[in-house]
Image (cartoon, rainbow, N blue to C red):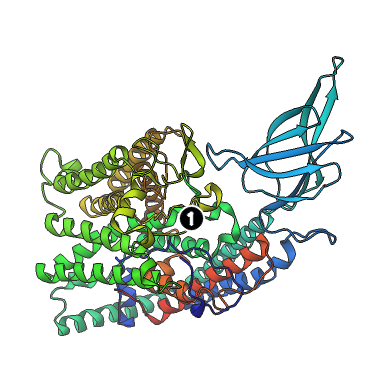
Amino acid sequence: MSSSPASDCTAGLSRPSYYSRSVDPGDRAVSDPAKLSNMTGSAMVPLYIRITEGACLAVLIALCSSLSAAVHGTSDADTPPLTIDTAYFKAESNAESYLIEVKWQTEECYQCILVPAGTFTDTDQTQILAMTQWPMNITAKFITHNASHECSLMYHFGEHGNYSLVVNVTMELDKNSTISCDVIVQKQPINSYIPIAVAFAIMVGLALITLVALYVYRTVKNKLGRYNILEDEETSHSRTTAVTVQAEEDGSKTDSARGEQKKRLRSLDTFRGISLTVMIFVNYGGGEYWFFDHSIWNGLTVADLVFPWFRWIMGVSMVLSFKVLRRNQVSNLQILYKILRRTVILFGLGLIVNGQGNHYMPEFRIPGVLQRFSITYLVVALMEFVFVKPATHNAGKWYSAIRDIVNYWAEWLIVLCLVAVQVILTFVLHVEDCPAPPGYLGPGGPLLFYKGNSLENCTGGAAGYVDRVIFGVQHIYTSPTCQDVYKTTMNYDPEGTLGCCTSIFMCFLGLQAGKILFTYETTIGKVKRWLAWALLTGAIAALLCKCSKNDGWIPINKNLWSVSFVLALSSMAFVLFTFCYIMVDVKGIWSGAPFRYPGMNSILVYVGHILLGDCFPFTWDTPATHGARLTVHLCGVAWWILISMYMYYIGFFVKI
């Protein structure tokens, strides 16, 4: 969707599509800053360290502000400036008189026909622009007055380079001619990855500064003597006792064990914060690098990871939420009300987001990211509401080692049935006006054919067809990621109906991770099970896609939310969560900073980055280069981390 002109704070900025925004409904809020230390599970981070972290991010913003001028490429003064991910191209020959017709197609456009690029003659050497994101399949047809010859090759152009396709004509003794094609570099391309290297070096340097500051702080603290340490511990104990006594007076807690209720799982906040930070970066544009944008169709990019991870994290958070609700003896009616209330709020917020820039109801988009969140949350939360059991249930049985699965066999049955429905409809349903047989999983479009018939009406196969039937073609997403490369004309929504089934499955796998967390006591028992799930889901995903981008039975595809996609992303989520759990909660090697701060206030940061994304200082006008755009987008992320750190410091958290 596009942003509303009225909401843009800066004119002339191109705003990226935000259909991959997500939010975690499992966030919890604490209104009393005095209870913040209990909420985080340990004493608050020292002010000195928070100031150091904030200062490092401020330095990042300052350094990034000068990055664009230092690293972006330039063009020759006598040629028009090149845009991002383009290069100059022309074709020529050693023959005296010639006409060359060039056709090409990017390798990313799988099985697409070649399209005309241009016609070049000995008197017309006009340069055209070539794409540089992916290799190009090129065919040159050399035409003379009595014959024509073709040559083909594949070449990956570099950004802002200048290239000539030279067609060499060789006359044989029998007067037949042969041709060969070579690409000559007239001007070397720029290295468009230098800005990433510079930004990475800056961030590593800031991380080292933070570690040194932390080391200095601990050293100084230790040298203050045993007396001060004991005094700090006594003060901390007094504050904890005061909070507990006040809670008992309020009637909200009836025993001392409730004092641990607000203890947060820091690793979950950290994982959520990592996903949110990456999401903001890619939503702001990701430096205009193709691998920081969503996949054209099949395959995975960085932008494809964050939204599914949020769905997985929502499952883990749900276990914690139900655990607290049951421990507080909240009635079933109140729990059901909370579930329905959150579902309605998420769906309504999604419609509000869809309304940005589009108030024309006959073309109003109905599906969306938050709408998918709400449906996923409703189904999984209702299952957990009905089937939730104590962690000790069946602990003494012979199958106690897998009781996290056996105790919830009914939930597994429901979820697997939903996955089966998605798969069956995908491979059995006939798509009207589409010549491809049932089971078509491609993007369609006028560049693809099946037995000589255009697949223009086949975008998304059954998934797209179901949405067009349910919502109508005018009420789904109008700019799918495949549109520019495959030249598709059909509307297609990546947050459509069939994808809800596999989205529920992914959230349920996160729920499974949460159940492992509270069912088994030992760290090694939890880690072994998480890694086993990572191996299992990853292996099944690899099998379904045949470890291939396009040739598997079920390719990894974010637009379709294919089963292989959900399993592959769940495998990564199990591994990353395990890493965060060990480093943050078990060993305490890492506090989770700076990602933990936005992770604890994900709704505030998420909504804020949408509403203020076009405002200074989160963005400003820059040259159309990777270096300049990367500067702006990293600074935008840094600002939101600083804001979330401040919110953490004052004890302000938002929930729905």
Which residue is depicted at the point 56% across and 60% down?
Answer: 286
The residue to which callout 1 is attached is 303
Left or right: where 414 falls relative to 278: left
Quadrant assignment, res 600: bottom left
Q: Position of residue 269 (x, y in %)?
A: 37, 64
Taking the spot 11% from the left edge, 50% from the top edge, the residue there is: 393
Q: Residue furthest right?
A: 96
| Residue 396 visible within the image | yes
Is 583 in front, or is 455? 455
Quadrant of residue 534 within the rendered picture: top left
Residue 58 placement, left or right of 423: right
Q: Quadrant of residue 606?
A: bottom left
Q: Quadrant of the C terminus?
A: bottom left
The type of residue carrying mark 1 is Ala
Picture coordinates of residue 63, whole percent (x, y): 66, 70
**Horizontal side, residue 207 vs residue 44: left or right:** right
The image shows residue 287, relative to residue 156, as above or below, that is below
Q: As displayed, is residue 363 above or below residue 251?
A: above
